DNA sequence: GGCGCTCCTTGATCTGCATCAATGCAGAAG
DNA sequence: CTTCTGCATTGATGCAGATCAAGGAGCGCC
């Protein structure tokens, strides 16, 4: 689980910290100087998670804040009777656990292999106090998340199953594009059940909708993803 | 619309700024000194809105940030075909327009009579840069909003109509309580249509659900609100 | 009073998605 | 190779909530 055992499994880097982590943080905290970055890096702790491994659990004490370096994390809430709502998929660059007070407000586990920077709660608190740059950046990230959440409320409250799936595919495409992986083929590492729980649908409805879109030649279903064949039509459906 | 014309319509206060505004800001920014508060107050601009008056419109240039002093504001997104999703109701102490970049991400209008502190975008930006205290407070507010939005995703994606209404009533009760107005009678200044658009239901379903809860002696419908008769049962339904 | 207006409630019917139930299919284990 | 196991797909049926339609009920206005 530790940095040196996993993604950065290289003794020569033990003292200088984790390179991947530093690079990622540089892009996240563009306004930080090299010294600040190093300081920040020293406070962080690089951890890895295998697919399906738990990152943290809803209502458990919030010990750490995470910044995702690689892979995809599923964030979800559960009701006592087992109903699940996935509130988001975290990709490289995203922060996890910002909104917590004492306990995590949701659970998180790895969709595929994940590596992340973990900050202890105290390290996080002192960092935020000492670095207005970083606080600004975190605030921007939080407000961006809020905007996405509001978009998702519109989707869950008022959109049809087909619209939900189309919006989801376009959003995933754009998120991969922002990570420098633009492609008409959208990777979908998560399961159909995950997509259903994210979109407020059942797995059957998601499957039928995929099949229908494929029949319409709007998409082409490929292993671990979907190729978008008619983005114009999709954009119209998703409009506003 | 200006402070002096409305809630603070009192010449003796012209020079010293708006008292209601200052008091409210003091509670919001508990860590600010009196001097800082005065400075902040000088940058703000007290405005009032009548019921149904527009505060700002989705996609229009984001000129201001608002802090609500009094009354309730409806925040909503529209689809081109007219479907509406209310993403929240803002009450005294809440900030509006934090998540914007260049344009507002949603529309806002007054449910009843509203007074608010408006900060121009530039005043807001300089304030945030100069006052780490305030930025911390705004960030906390944003993450709290994010938590609420995630709760709402769970509600919209996975809960039944009756559960949605019950969660809504309990949430409204708690919000009034935090404003120092605790009561078993929950004021509901917004229309049934607003509640429906907030909960992702139709007005008919909301009306029927209210009627059913009243028949069950869970609530009592009173003018402009609801009295909660069986909060124990409601808490069980809303659990987690 | 009567009229218009807006909001709310109630009933009848419809439908999109959930639920229930097989079946398919690919990778892992034997 | 066969069997198992965990998804994904597909079909048949059911139902919660949407839609359609018809009254109230409160309220300002003439």
Image: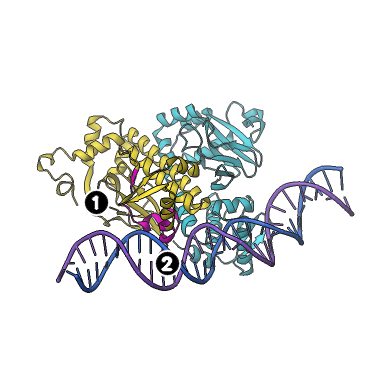
Chain colours: A cyan, B yellow, C blue, D purple
Q: Residue furthest left?
A: B12
Q: Is residue B195 above or below residue B83?
A: above
- Name the residue nearer the viewer: A113 or B157: B157
> Would residue B45 be found to the left or right of residue B213 on screen?
left
Badge 2 marks a residue whose secondary structure is loop
Queried whether the magenta region covers residue B191, the answer comes back as: yes
Q: Position of residue B79 (x, y in %)?
A: 42, 62
Q: Position of residue B83 (x, y in %)?
A: 42, 62
Q: Position of residue B34 (x, y in %)?
A: 23, 30
Identify which residue is drawn at 36% across, 39% down.
Answer: B138
Say which chain tag 2 marks. Answer: B
- Residue B206 visible somewhere in the drawing: yes
- The residue that label 2 is drawn on is B81
Queried whether the magenta region covers residue A142, the answer comes back as: no
Picture quadrant of residue C22:
bottom right
Tell me where the magenta segment starts and ends, as one range.
Answer: B185-207
Q: Residues within 10 Å of mark 1 (few under 14, many from 20)?
A: some
- Residue A148 visible somewhere in the drawing: no
Badge 1 marks a residue whose secondary structure is loop
- Name the residue nearer the viewer: B45 or A4: B45
Query: What is the C-alpha distance between the residues marked 1 and 2?
Result: 29 Å
- The residue that label 1 is drawn on is B113
């Amino acid at each position: 689980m530790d940095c040196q055992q996993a993604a950065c499994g290289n003794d020569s880097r033990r003292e200088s910290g984790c390179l991947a982590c530093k690079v990622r943080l540089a892009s996240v905290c563009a306004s930080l100087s090299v010294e600040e970055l190093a300081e920040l890096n020293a406070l962080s702790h690089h951890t890895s998670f295998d697919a399906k491994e738990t990152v943290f659990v809803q209502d458990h004490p919030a010990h750490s804040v995470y910044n995702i370096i690689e892979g995809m994390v599923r964030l979800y809430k559960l009701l006592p009777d087992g109903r699940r709502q996935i509130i988001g998929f975290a990709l490289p660059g995203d922060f996890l656990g910002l909104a917590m007070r004492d306990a995590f407000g949701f659970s998180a586990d790895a969709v595929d292999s994940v590596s992340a920077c973990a900050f202890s709660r105290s390290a996080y608190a002192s960092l935020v106090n000492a670095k207005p740059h970083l606080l600004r950046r975190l605030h921007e990230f939080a407000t961006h998340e809020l905007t996405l959440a509001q978009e998702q409320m519109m989707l869950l409250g008022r959109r049809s199953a087909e619209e939900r799936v189309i919006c989801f595919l376009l959003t995933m495409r754009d998120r991969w594009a922002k990570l420098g992986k633009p492609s008409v083929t959208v990777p979908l590492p998560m399961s159909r059940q995950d997509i259903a729980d994210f979109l407020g649908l059942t797995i059957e409805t998601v499957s039928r909708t995929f099949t229908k879109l494929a029949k319409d030649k709007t998409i082409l279903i490929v292993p671990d993803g979907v190729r978008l064949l008619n983005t114009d039509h999709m954009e119209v459906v998703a409009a506003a």
